[in-house]
Image (cartoon, rainbow, N blue to C red):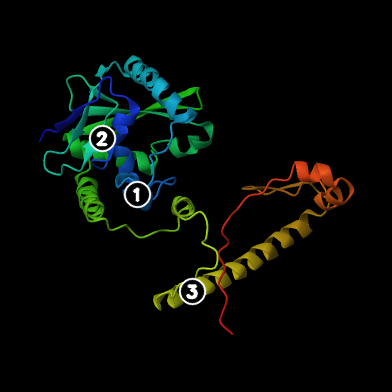
Amino acid sequence: MQASVLVKTKNMDRNEWLQWRKKGIGGSDAAAVAGLNPWKSPIEVYLEKIGEIPEPEDNEKMYWGRILEDIVAKEFTLRTGKKVRRRNFMLRHPKYEFMIANIDRELVGEKVGLECKTVSEYGKSEWEGDKVPDQYIIQCQHYMAVTGYEGWWIAALIGGNKFIYKYIKRDEEIIQYLIKIESDFWKMVEERTPPPLDGSKSSENILKLLYPEAAEGTEIELPEEVEELIVARENIKAQIKKLETKQLEIENKIKAMLKENEVGRTPKYIVSWKTYSRTSIDSKKLKIEQPEIYEKYLQVSTYRKFDVREVK
């Protein structure tokens, strides 16, 4: 199997590249579609593909990721002796044409690709030992599904001072799973049927973006199924409160053992109960004594508060 060329990307500007990305599911979309991207939900990908929301704006992180991609690729060659080259095309699966790939590099003389990453210091624990973050495993398996390649290297510069590289084998079971869920997802895109919302922060942010303000004084009749959702919500809230109370009980028992000590130790844990100070402005006093200054620096923001009350 060999991938077909969707479009040549050399010298293509970012806006045009983003438009071509809407024609299918790319490697960075795959983990979100599978529900394994901690920063992006399926509904966000769906809305991007149908043009309801814009693709994320270019930012410093994305800029430096592109700049450092070449450095990561060169360092991979230095450390492994494996030559790599660019593939200046957006590729697509020969059968499932909605599966597309814009790969970083491919190895010369091998049916293997290379994905280059730059990672912050905060994410280093996800790369310890043989570990690779789930979303990047899915991304590489997606690329293997599109290209037919037998493996994929992933190289990462962590925190600007630690370089690692790992090999990911082609996994037919994962690839068949991706083909199935991506096929189902693309059918939703074609039929304009949105995937269900989930509990991710991404889904919450999408709703804020789509419906930022309530039309004052408006009211609708909700379907009966909403009552089942409300009961489920109330049950969960009760469980959370019970667990929070239990958590506080445990913490109080440990605090009583610490007494006035700042730190306590066991063979496995370090426990601290330190004193901190915080400076804040007394806004009520400022409003009374310096109303002009208070008004000058007053900042008004709008938000929508979700609330549920039982009908009396």
Which residue type carries mark 3? Ile
- How packed mark 2 is, by other alpha carbons closer than 10 Å (few <14, some 14-19, many 20 or more), is some
Q: Could you say whether the residue bearing mark 3 is in a helix, strand or loop?
A: helix
Q: Which mark is residue 47?
A: 1
User: Which residue is label 3 attached to?
Assistant: 230
- Of labels 3 and 1, earlier in sequence is 1
Q: Mark 2 points at which residue?
A: 20
* Residue for point 82% across, 42% down: 293
Element on which disc 2 rests: helix
Q: Are marks 1 and 2 in contact (CB under 8 Å)?
A: no
Quarter the N terminus occupies: top left
Residue 277 in view here: no
* Residue drawn at point x = 21 percent, y = 41 percent: 99
> What separation in Å lies between label 3 and label 1 (alpha carbons)?
26 Å
Check the image and report above or below for 62 versus 241.
Answer: above
Q: Please state if 248 lies on the left or on the right of 207 as rendered.
A: right
Type of amino acid under label 1: Leu
Percent of width and height locating residue 212: 51, 54
